[in-house]
Amino acid sequence: MRILAMRADRPPPKEAARVTSPPYDTLSTAEARNLAKDNPLSFLHVSRSEIDLPEGTDPYSDQVYAAAKAYFEKLRAEEHLIRDSEPAIYLYEQQMGEHRQRGFVALCHTDDYEKNVIKKHEKTREAKENDRLRHNKTIGAQPGLVFLAYRDNAETDELLSDLATGKPLYEFTDENDVRHSAWRVTGTGDIVAAFAKIPAAYIADGHHRAASAWRAAREFRAANRNHTGNEPYNWFPACLFPASKLRILPYNRVVKDLNELEPTEFLEKLGEICSVTANARPAPAKAGHVSMYLAKKWYDLSFKTPRAGNPIARLDVSILQDRVLDPVLGIEDPRVDTRIDFVGGIRGAKELEKLVNSGVAQVAFSMYPVSLEQLMEIADAGEIMPPKSTWFEPKLRSGFLVHPYK
């Protein structure tokens, strides 16, 4: 792994709670507008700038990107974002309830992304890549951190412990009651050297951010006759966490209809595929089980899981897709089928019940979370996980440690 200290654009510590925001892709336009409406400092005015334009504005229109640039420059001009005086690496800690995770915020090289030193486990959508590519090039910076994991390492664990001493530079609580703390480290040689011994990192969250950073670097290189490889556009900001400290929540599914089946017919077909038990708990207790909400009742679906073969085939999301969603409900490709939707595990079982009880969906499937080891095994094999397999929580903040191109 190659990492580098960064000269970030960052909010003054006292304003961090107001300036930083959830990642752009975790909120709808309506949710972003509501969250930022009474907060003129919110970075959502940059990352989701359509919220300040008339309702119904195309989020990919020229005026949206122009508005993002104008607001970003406004935050800078009014010193709600200030440039680091010298490069630094940040230790970033998040606490959500009893869960705590701490990692390093630094720059990673786009060549490592291209050469698969930074490993992927998801396919990206071209439209989303294009959006972030244009957004970042327009504002002249990469405002969102890519969420990376690496296999635990005693040397980096020691640095995470030893360097996070004294009062943190940042300490604030966000709108979801997540506690954020960060320490600034300017003597970064030991950290850089430690990561040089780490063979790979894995994208946990932020595939589109990483892909758009790589594409931006390619475009800037092509336009720069004096390219050296050391220009800021060759690097993107990321937070690197030891894998054992992370928590993956399930990514649940809801389906709008039963493919012209009555609930009793659907249950009969399921009985031919797996073991179905009524009055189940809303969250499955272990892998190989899926909790299903249908007609105001929870059911446990127990599947026989393949013990060998492709690691993707052993995932619960794959088993559900291959044995139920495709053959019974007719959802061949969940990436494009509008009859299926995905609900992050942070929203809980109540959200699934609400969607079904209101008629928005006819059936919901509550999944057991994928493990980090499964994710890394699949990425190591060069394979791609099914869509919407993992939901990492807590999320990294946007507008916190911004990497400018100049």
Image: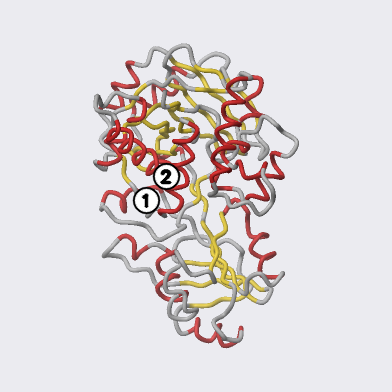
Q: Is residue 185 left or right of residue 168?
A: left
**What color scheme is it?**
secondary structure
Q: Is residue 374 left or right of residue 79?
A: left
User: Horizontal and vertical percent for residue 23?
Assistant: 55, 41
Which residue, given by chain and number where applicable, does mark 1 sit on?
375
User: Horizontal and vertical percent for residue 261?
Assistant: 57, 86
User: Horizontal and vertical percent for residue 105?
Assistant: 44, 27
The crowding category of the residue bearing disc 1, from other C-alpha atoms within 10 Å (few below 14, some 14 to 19, many at least 20), is many
Please name the residue shown 58% across and 34% down the image.
95
Three-letter amino acid code of the residue under disc 2: Ala
SS at badge 2: strand
Q: Are marks 2 and 1 in contact (CB under 8 Å)?
A: yes
Which mark sits nearer the N-terminus, 2 or 1? 2
Please name the residue shown 72% across and 69% down the image.
358
Please state which of residues 238 and 392 is positioned toward the viewer in this rendering.
Answer: 238
Which residue, given by chain and number where applicable, does mark 2 sit on?
204
SS at badge 1: helix
- Quadrant that contains the N terminus: top left
Three-letter amino acid code of the residue under disc 1: Leu
Q: CA distance from mark 2 to mark 1?
A: 8 Å
